[in-house]
Image: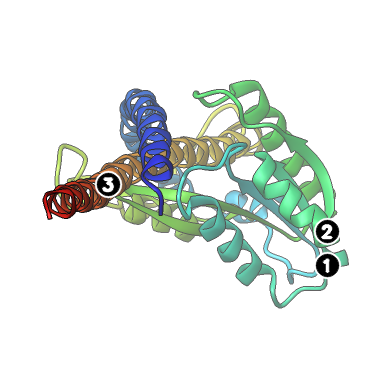
């Protein structure tokens, strides 16, 4: 390779390094913000579990439409991905987990709600019905979108258009670990919320003591059990979905920050190797020129 080409490649790699470093810095700021929101939201998931545990002793909860268990003939999938790439294997892991969960069902039995272009475009290309789609551009959770999505899937589940509602997202474990996860949002169950809480409790830190409460005897509520449940159960489902959104946002920015850091480190390594190669070739060229000059002088002297 010519010295000129190597020098041009070094300059190009240095410019790439500046871009990836800038993106790494931006993603780090967003990551800290979304991680704080996800961690702060975890006690609310436990509070939802406590509420559901206290209600689980009553027969009215089992009869509520959002807790009705039916054979899963028709499914809804809520897929949470990003609009942009440059986040490593984050989106591909979520899409693979979702595809594995749907493998046993025909395409005409599945309806997809996509939040993020990567998700709904993936399933649209494969012939799945896309009921609704939203772009995932903002860095914070869009509450109007979350409430609209929660309300629609709950209404259609009650109308028996769906027998089960699944959510595929990336569960935030740490800055360097995000786990593709598929959870059952509806029918709402104590076991489902308990698995959610058990999965999100970190091994260490101020949230590590969040245990799962046991079910307790039924309470007497006023004005009527049915009125309380009609107001409370949809809110519990919405709280679970909101938590999925928080985890997905924290995972996205963490994965992008790590990917950009890896790219920055790799670009530095490439520049170092190219510089070493450039110096070796330049030294060889100088040595050759000196040898030619010395040889010419000796020829003239002779």
Element type at mark 1: helix
Q: Position of residue 258 (x, y in %)?
A: 33, 43
Instruction: Please name the residue shown 55% across and 42% down the image.
Output: 85
> Quick one: 108 or 43, which is closer to the camera?
108
Q: Is residue 39 left or right of residue 114?
A: left
Q: Position of residue 231 (x, y in %)?
A: 62, 31
| 3D distance between C-alphas at marks 1 and 3 | 56 Å
Q: Which label's residue is closer to the chain start, 3 or 2?
A: 2
Q: Position of residue 170 (x, y in %)?
A: 47, 50
Q: Are marks 3 and 2 in contact (CB under 8 Å)?
A: no
Element type at mark 3: helix
| 3D distance between C-alphas at marks 3 and 2 | 53 Å
Q: Quadrant location of the N terminus?
A: bottom left
Instruction: Please name the residue shown 27% across and 47% down the image.
Output: 278
Which mark, by number, is residue 263? none
| Residue placed under numbered mark 3 in the picture | 278
Q: Is residue 288 left or right of residue 257?
A: left
Q: Residues within 10 Å of mark 3 (few under 14, many from 20)?
A: many
Q: Residues within 10 Å of mark 1 (few under 14, many from 20)?
A: some
| Residue placed under numbered mark 1 in the picture | 107
Q: Which label's residue is closer to the chain start, 1 or 2?
A: 1
Residue 221 visible from this viewpoint: yes
Image height check: is 259 above or below 33?
below
> Quick one: 54 or 272, which is closer to the camera?
272
> Quick one: 301 or 73, which is closer to the camera?
301
Q: Position of residue 125 (x, y in %)?
A: 81, 57
| Residue placed under numbered mark 2 in the picture | 128
């Amino acid at each position: 390779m010519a010295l000129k080409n190597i020098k041009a490649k070094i300059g190009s790699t240095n410019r790439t390094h500046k871009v990836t470093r800038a993106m790494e810095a931006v993603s780090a700021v967003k990551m800290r913000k979304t991680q704080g929101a996800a961690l702060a939201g975890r006690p609310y998931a436990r509070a939802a579990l406590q509420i559901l545990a206290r209600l689980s002793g009553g027969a009215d909860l089992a009869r509520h439409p959002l807790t009705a268990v039916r054979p899963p003939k028709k499914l809804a999938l809520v897929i949470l991905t990003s609009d942009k790439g440059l986040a490593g294997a984050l989106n591909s892991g979520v899409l693979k987990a979702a595809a594995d969960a749907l493998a046993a069902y025909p395409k005409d039995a599945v309806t997809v709600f996509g939040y993020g272009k990567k998700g709904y475009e993936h399933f649209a290309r494969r012939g799945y019905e896309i009921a609704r789609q939203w772009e995932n551009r903002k860095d914070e959770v869009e509450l109007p979108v979350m409430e609209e999505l929660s309300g629609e899937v709950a209404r259609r589940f009650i109308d028996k258009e769906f027998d089960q509602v699944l959510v595929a997202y990336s569960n935030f474990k740490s800055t360097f670990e995000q786990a593709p996860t598929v959870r059952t949002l509806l029918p709402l169950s104590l076991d489902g919320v308990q698995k959610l809480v058990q999965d999100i409790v970190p091994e260490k830190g101020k949230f590590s003591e969040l245990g799962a409460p046991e079910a307790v005897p039924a309470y007497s509520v006023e004005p009527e059990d049915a009125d309380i449940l009609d107001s409370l159960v949809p809110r519990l489902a919405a709280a679970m979905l909101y938590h999925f959104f928080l985890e997905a946002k924290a995972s996205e920015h963490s994965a992008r920050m790590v990917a950009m850091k890896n790219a920055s480190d790799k670009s530095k390594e490439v520049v170092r190797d190219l510089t070493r190669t450039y110096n070796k070739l330049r030294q060889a060229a100088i040595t050759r020129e000196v040898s030619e000059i010395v040889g010419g002088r000796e020829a003239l002297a002779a």
